[in-house]
Image (cartoon, rainbow, N blue to C red):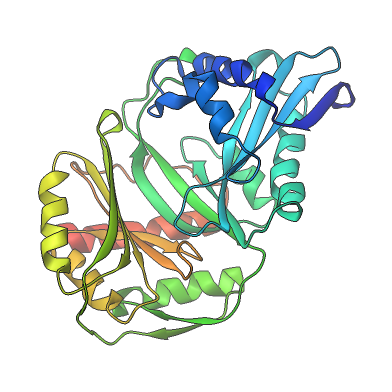
Amino acid sequence: MTNDINITLFQPDDAPDICDIYRKTYGDDFPIPYVYIPEEIIKRYDGINHRTAIARTKDGQFAGMASMFRSTPNPLMYEAGQLMIKKNFRKMGIADHLVKTIHVEFPTQVPIKGQFVEALCNHTISQKLSEGYSFIPTALEIEWLPTINFDSAKALERNISLLMEFKTFNDTPHEIFLHPAYIDYVTDRCRALKAERTIKSDFVSGTRTTEKTTDIIADAGIATLSVTHAGADWPEILAHFETEAAMYRRQVRIDISHPSAPWAINLMRENGFFLGGYLPLWFEGDGLLLQKLTKTPDFSLPQFFSDEGNSVMEAVQTDYVRATSA
């Protein structure tokens, strides 16, 4: 049946169908409003910042889509996602063709150093698809995704965990600075990725002003702090973020290319943050994800396609126990 499907690059005329599939998949609950506005989609889906594959039947019916897009401080690390197939076209192999397009073809068409996916953990389908293309699990965002209504079904009682999986296409050896508590974990993930890193772990206080970006999505109940350099004012920056985002699930993603990173991570650990995972090439260098929740997570809920995914969760859970029992 997939012989009757054409895979093409997004064109402006596809925008209304993208809005429609979001509405059919998530209702009106998706926390990023622009996906319901055709003009905004046309503006953003430029083929470089946001590159989208569209599946249509021979007679022009919209069947599905998938994308890779820039979502990190490193413009050469792309997120792969937005895989959605209309209900009446599922189980026909269309998803396989779309996934191949974004994971194999797109990386040859634009400058890129790597891709990552945030695979759902309420089932293992998306993990199976990405790991089939040699993506490696490196981080777990525990109970991070709001329980929006997939296919207008009843929302789940708990937020959905996301397994972050990475694949590098153009990596070079470099130095990273890690808190001693995470050296073994990151070393193991680098080994799986075949990424060569020199790790240092001395505590060196920041000197200049912290460089950071804060993003709070109130409707989703989440707050992120992206730290490209932890400076002398890091204690005050972290305290302000904790106050500003106290009612939200929190993530800090910190660039570990700077000697002050272990010192900054230690302060987060002292304030109840726990491991999320390793983010290769997230910045121009690598990153480390730490997280903090507003209630106790249920570690029995996430499902994993492979032992690699399960081992990531075990590391996250161990550090969560450390953070909440101190």
Quarter of the image that includes the C terminus:
bottom left
Q: Quadrant of residue 160?
A: top left
Relative to 112, 299 lies left or right: left
Vertical arrangement, residue 274 with respect to residue 141, above or below? below
Residue found farthest to the right = 3
- Locate residue 47, reporting x and y percent: 66, 41
How many marks can you see?
A: 0
Relative to 189, 167 lies left or right: right
Quarter of the image that includes the N terminus:
top right
> Can residue 1 be spotted in the picture?
no
- Locate residue 272, reporting x and y percent: 16, 59
- Locate residue 234, reporting x and y percent: 17, 67
Relative to 226, 4 lies left or right: right
Which residue is at 19% across, 41% downward?
295
Which residue is at 11% across, 58% downward?
239
Vertical arrangement, residue 299 with respect to residue 227, above or below? above
Vertical arrangement, residue 316 with respect to residue 294, above or below? below
Vertical arrangement, residue 87 with respect to residue 318, above or below? above
